[in-house]
Amino acid sequence: MYARGIVELFPYLMDPYSKNGYEHFYDGESGSGYLAWWLKIIQRSASSESGGSSRQLTGGPAARREALFSPEITLSEEQCKEAMALMRYCTDEATIKEKMKMTFQYRRSMVLDGEKSSDILTELPHFKDVKSLIEQDFILQFGKDVAARFMERWTTTFKQKVIQQCWDSDLSSIILLLHLIPPSAQGWRRPGKVSAAQAEKHLVVFKKSGTSIEEHVDAIKCVTQSYLLAVGMKRSTIHEFFIILDMQVIPCKSTITLGAFDEFFKAHFVFGTMCNQMLHNLYTFIQTFTT
């Protein structure tokens, strides 16, 4: 199904010399093809990883990399701690954003420190009330061009090809993409196939307007995973989005689906948090697609 979906979305990838045109992606009779080969690679990688933690310093959002932003004045560790302490009680957004810039390098070291990373939202509670801080931190890491790339390319390059086979909405097209890209293998420690429907529950959760967000968070059993919480009268009319991360609630600045998903994707890099293993293939595709 996935191989057929690829060549239907991208006809130029069809093989004119094979029976169905998609056997080079996956041949059901022989079990061969690119998708089969790639899944084997993922399985080997997954089985060799140590399980349990959502924060790993091996790649992706948690990778150690040189940020594009370079502050004019470098603060000492004590000065950074003082600035962060002052921010906790500050209510002026402009001042908060400036202090966040000044302490960016120090905060990145906290994010990449396995012992300190879980305290980020406690130490910096303004991530939960100043809605543009995730975007600002992502820009400081990668620059404005990279920060804008997903929004630009999804709309102009990919969305129309996807929605031809699904409902006319951004979230539906993202979810369809999840169905077209096989969920990541779980490794030998957790055998068994994972359906796209199962993986979808780790990407976005819908709640009707009026639902207590606090009660929803209190009912979470797994504290290390993140997902996008969509709130509205029905799935086709979402009016508010939240990022759920380590049982913390971060309101999204955007009230449209694509913008909220863009913030959610960037939050993984801002907080150095690995995505759910089931969504690894989807996020790898988006990360590759936007670079």
Image: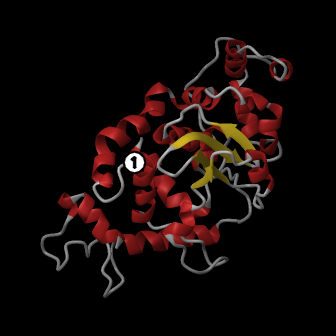
**What color scheme is it?**
secondary structure
| Residue, far bottom | 29
Q: Is residue 181 visible?
A: yes
The picture places residue 15, in percent across and down from the top left corner, at: 18, 69
Is 267 placed above or below 31 here?
A: above
Question: Circle 1 sits on which residue?
Answer: 169
Q: Is residue 63 visible?
A: no
The picture places residue 84, in percent across and down from the top left corner, at: 81, 23
Is 236 placed above or below 199 here?
A: above
40 to the left or right of 220 = left
Q: Within 10 angstroms of label 1, few (less than 14), some, or many (20 or more) residues?
A: few
* Nearer to me, 18 or 267: 267
12 to the left or right of 29 = left
Number of disc labels: 1
Identify the residue shown where x is 41% and y is 59%: 176
Is 149 placed above or below 9 here?
A: above
State which quarter of the image contains the N terminus.
bottom left
The picture places residue 48, in percent across and down from the top left corner, at: 63, 69
Identify the residue shown where x is 86% and y is 19%: 82
The picture places residue 180, in percent across and down from the top left corner, at: 39, 64
* Nearer to me, 171 or 194: 171
Identify the residue shown where x is 43% and y is 28%: 145
Q: Quadrant of residue 16?
A: bottom left
As shown in the figure, which amino acid type bears the numbered disc 1? Ser
125 to the left or right of 256 = right
